[in-house]
Every structure is written in structure tokens, then in C-alpha cells.
Amino acid sequence: MQKSTALVEEQFDQKVSMALCRAVDEISKTEETNVLKSTCIINADGKKSCCSDELSSFMQKDNVKGLVASSLNYYDIDMPYDLGVSECKAGAPTNAEKKPYSCSLTPVTDTESHTLAVSFPNKKEYVFEEMGLMLALSFLILLLITLLVIYGNYYVIKQKRISERNKEFFNHMAHEFKTPLTNIGLASNMLSKKMNSPLVDIITNENQQLNEQVNRVLAMASIENGQYLISNDRINLVKTIQSVVDNLSMLISNKKAIVKIIDNTDGVTIMGDAFHLSNAIRNIIDNSLKYSDQNPKIDIKIDKSDHEVIVRVEDNGIGISDKNQKLLFEKFYRCSEGLSTSHKGFGLGLSYVKKIIELHKGKISVESELHQGTQFELSLPNSIRYA
């Protein structure tokens, strides 16, 4: 708006200057001008000078004022103005003494001693009138932007409330599931002792799988709400990973998988939470076992540098596309490659893994190609105690 105002004023100034010069040129062609020139006094140095009073009276004549008004109208300037004659001071540059709207009266007086000057008391009103459409459009645009911002904030707040309610619902639902799942687990264990039936095994396995999903939801909720602080225990990372692999031995056997642990650290120890780190490693290995269209081969390499321990879990599974890698660690996100199989889940596993690694001041990354396998890399500091 400031630039537009300056542009309108600049255009106005140019039109006034051209109108004044046009008016002076028209005035110089009148008969009264010849009479005016004859009244000029010859100075000792041979130069003519005009009396200011005579010039002022001359410029107030109706025909002269009419020529000025005609010139202003010619340039579409139709507003009140004050007309006068300004005398240039001796010894000062002519241009420096000119008023903003003035033109030399040289064609009228044959001297550089006076200028025709005009002022506009209502110039600001003219500028605002010229910018009326622009001001209205600017106001409408600002109003529209304000309304959009208000609506956007309202919509975000509304969605946030819905998200919080959904989160509370899932958390309450998960808590409510814990009691019946525990009772089903106890009942299935008692039945398995009394009878050997495939139905009992199905109940036990499905109950265990559902219990794991519920525990995962509750763990994520407690971590996000800041209700859980990771432990500061000194743990042997290699033994922890070996324990996870041993616990998955039945699943590994059923999948006819080969899992190798390659330790290049001589049994490194770190500070951390053994329970959650075990669950994080278990989630990654479990995914490698699930999402494979052949006999899974999983290599777990453990390396150490001066400041961190690096765990790489590499498999020969179905791989992950570039599109899915960008959203791999988002909550409730499931890869389209994984959905093509019969495996089910909430899409919380890798989100949980990322959260746990970050709570340990570490980083997680993934490298994968479709049908070429996947490698997860976990970087954990080896000498930090966590608050």
C-alpha cells in the first residue's frame, strides 16, 4: 500500500508539472503578456526583472486563471487549488528554490526570477480517491485471510480435541481389555494342563498375540504422556539381543529361519532400559520373520565406536518401497507391502521402536529396496545416563 501510494503521488506530481508548463506556454501567447513584458525594469547589468506585485495581479486575471484551469483539466486534475507567483532568491540555484508544483515564468517575463506555483489543499483526499478500489480489495483480502486463519485454527483445535478423545478411548479400551485377557490366559493355561487340544493352543496363541498388542498400545500411551521414564541400568547389549532371539526360537523354527548374531564389540555394555530395548529389538526381528516370502535369513551385527554402539538388523525379506520408508515410523501406519500378506497389527511396532531409541538419545534409520531385503540401523550412545 505504501508503494502504491507513492506511485499515485508521483503520477499526480508529473501531471501537475506538465499542466503548469502547458499553462505557462499558453499564457505567453496572450496579448496581456506583451504589456507585462514592457513593464519590466532594465537593471544596471542589462538584465530584466519583473515586479512580483504586477505578476501576481496578472496571474489573478480571469483569462489567465482560465488557462491554468483548462490545463489542469486537460490532465484530469479537477480539484480546488491555490495559484500564486513565487520569486526566486538572488544567488540561489533556480531549481532549489522551486516549490513542489511550480514552473518557470521565463516565456512570460524573459527572466528566471519568478515561477508560477500551485498548491492543492485536498491532495490527500485525491490520493485516497484514486486508491479507493485498491483499498477496498486490500481490505477484502485481509478480511478473507483473517477468516481463513480463524477457521483453520478452529478446525485444528477441533481435530486436536477429537484426536485426544480417540487417544483416551483407545487407552481406556486397552485397559478394559487387560482384565478379560488375563482371565482368558489363566483359563487357557488351566485347560492345557487338563487336556491336550488344538483348540486350547489356538486360544492360548491368539490371547498372547492380543495381549501383546494391548501392552504395546499402553506402552506407547504412557511414553507419549510422559508417564514412563526409562531405567538407567547397565546392560549387556549382546546378551540382551541373544535373549530376544532365544525367546523367539519357536517362531524362528516355524519359519525355518536362520538368525545370526555377529558381535564385534566383545560384549559391549550400555546404560539403558533392558525391558524396552528388548521389545524394540524384538519388534524389528519379528517384522523380519513375518515379512518374508522365503526362508528368512537375519544377520544382527553389533559394532562399537568411541561414542556409540551400532546395531544393524539385516534381512532378506520383501523389502520396503521408498514411498513407505518416509512414513515407516508413523503411528498406525502399515506398509502396503505388508498389507499384501495375512499378517495383522495396529501399525505401532516401528513407531514404538523409534520412540524407545530416541528416549535413549539414539537414532534409527532404514535402508531397503523392494524384493532386496531391509536393514535397520540403531545407534545408541555407550556412555550416557538418561534423566
Image (cartoon, rainbow, N blue to C red):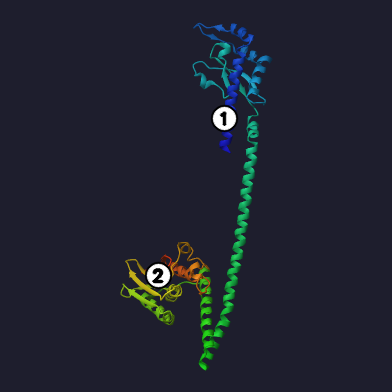
Identify the residue shown where x is 60% and y is 62%: 159
Most foreground residue, 296 or 351: 296
For residue 300, what is the image quadrant? bottom left
Of the residues tagged 1 and 2, which is closer to the observer? 1
Residue beneath the point at 59% across and 65% down: 163
Residue kind at label 2, given as amino acid type? Arg
Residue type beneath disc 1: Glu
Identify the residue at horizontal 65%, vertical 23% (top origin): 73
Real-space CA distance between mark 1 and mark 2, rounded to the nearest whole angstrom: 69 Å
| x then y, percent, for residue 221 | 53, 71
Judge whether 151 appears above or below 58 on screen: below
Secondary structure category for the residue under label 1: helix
Residue wearing tag 1: 10
For disc 2, the marked residue is 385
**Which corner quadrant of the image does residue 354 belong to?**
bottom left
Q: What element carries label 2?
A: loop
Report whether 78 appears left or right of 347.
right
Along the viewing direction, whichever of 142 and 36 lies nearer the viewer: 142
- Neighbourhood count class around disc 1 (C-alpha, 10 Å): few under 14, some 14–19, many 20 upward: few
1 or 2: tag closer to the N-terminus = 1
The location of residue 44, given as percent across then percent down, is 50, 5
Quarter of the figure that contains the C terminus: bottom left
Residue 135 appears in the figure: yes
- Residue 306 located left or right of residue 175: left
